[in-house]
Image (cartoon, grey):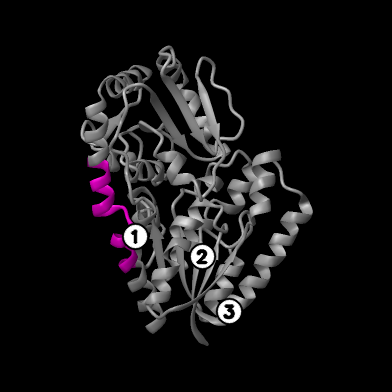
Amino acid sequence: MKEKIFFLTKYDRNGASSRYRSLQYLPMIGKSGLEYEISPLFSERYLIEKYKNGITPFLLVFGLFIRRLLAIFRALSHSVVVIEYELIPFFPAIFEWLLQYKGCKLIIDYDDAIFHRYDAHKSFLIRILFKNKIRSVMRSANIVIVGNKYLANYAHSAGSKQVELIPTVVDLSKYPVFKSNFQSNVFNIGWIGSPSTTKYLYSIAPALAHMCQNDNVIVTLIGAGSIELPGVSLKILPWSEEIEVECLSSFDVGIMPLPDEPWARGKCGFKLIQYMASGLPVIASSVGVNKEIVDDGVNGFLSDSNEQWVEALERLYRNVDMRAKMGGGGRKLIENKYCINVTGDKLVRLLTGLVKD
C-alpha cells in the first residue's frame, strides 16, 4: 500500500467548504513531504445547474456518481483517505465500510450538521433509512475533524474514537491589506454566501429596509443569485474567487443572520471570519459558534430581534471610528485563531500521524 493521502472532497475550488476545509491546506501538506491525490464529488457544472435552474440533469448526476465510484476504488490503494462529510449523499455507508475493511485509515471532516439533513428530513422513509448514517460513519472513522463544538458534541455522542476541532479558517496571505479607511459618505452593508443561504436574509429585511431610508445606505450581496427584499437598495455581485477579497473590502459592515435551529447551530461562522479578516465590524445572530466568534460590543454585535439589528446598524452607521476599532479587533482575532498559520500545523500532524501509524 502506498503512503499517499487521498482527499475525497465534496466540491472542487468552486465549493467553499472544500476550498477552505481541504484544498487551501494542500501546499502546506505538500511541503511536509506528504503525497496526496484529490477527487471531488460535484463539479463546477453541477453547481451552476443547481443554482441557476434549481435542479441538475440526471445524466450529469449519474456521471458524477460513476466518477465517485471510480475514485473510491482508486482510494483503496492509499493508506489514508480524507472524506468530506460522506462518500455519496442519500446512499448507505457501504463504501466507507469497504475502505476500512480494505485497511484504509479514514478521516471524516464536517463543517455542517449534515446529520440533520437525514434525521430531520420531511420524508419518513429518509429518516428511517438514514437517520443513523452519519453516526455510523463517525463511529467507525479513525479521526473525525469538526468545525465547531456543536459538531464535536454530536461526534462524541456517536462514539467517535478521536474528535479534533479545527475551525474553518482563511489564508491571511489572501487578505494582505484590510480595511481601515472607513468613509462617512456611504454605508455599505455586506453579505457573502450562496443562493441556498439567502433565505436567512428575509428575517432581517425590515431592519435593512429601515436603514435604506437613508440615501447613502446600500446592501451588497455577493453570490446571492436572484433575490428581492422590499424597500432595500440592493447591489448583487456574482461570486468569484479572484475578486472575492476585493469585494469584501468594499463593505462597511458584514452581516450574518441565522435562525436558532439545529441546522444553523452546526454552522461554522465562516462569513464572520471572512469579514473580520477584511477588517470589518460584524453583526450576527447569537446562534451557535457566532457567540464564540463575536465578542459583543468589541469586534461586532450579536443581534436577534429586529430592534437589536436596527440599533446595531444605526450605531455603526453613525460612528466611523467604531467601525474601524471593531474591524481592527476582529482582524486580530483572525490572526490569533482563525487562519491557516494557526490550524495548518495541527492538520498536518494528524495526517502524518495516521500515515506513519
Give the amino acid at mark 1: Ile
Q: Amino acid at mark 3?
A: Leu
The image position of residue 155, as x and y in percent, is 39, 57
Cα separation between marks 2 and 3: 13 Å
- Judge whether residue 66 is colored magenta: no
Is 345 part of what is drawn in magenta? yes
Regarding mark 3 in the picture, which secondary structure is present there?
Answer: loop
Rendered image quadrant of residue 138? bottom left
Task: Examine the rendered structure and indicate whether residue 107 appears above or below residue 295.
Answer: below
Horizontally, residue 77 falls left or right of residue 284, namely: right
Question: Do we see residue 22 in this rendering?
Answer: no
Name the one closer to the observer, 305 or 206.
206
The chief SS type of the magenta part is: helix
Instruction: Give the numbered dot on residue 340.
Output: 1
Q: Please determine whether, in this image, residue 113 is positioned above or below residue 160.
A: above
Q: Badge 3 is on which residue?
A: 76
* Residue at the image position 25 percent from the left and 34 percent from the top: 324
Which segment did they paint magenta? 329-346
Q: Residue at x 58, y 74 (%)?
A: 98
* Distance CA(mark 1)–CA(mark 3): 29 Å
Q: Nearer the viewer, residue 23 or 220?
A: 220
Which of label 1 and label 3 is nearer to you? 1
SS class, disc 2: strand
Relative to 306, say whether 268 is above or below: below
| Image depth: mark 2 or mark 1 in front | 1
Residue ID for mark 2: 83
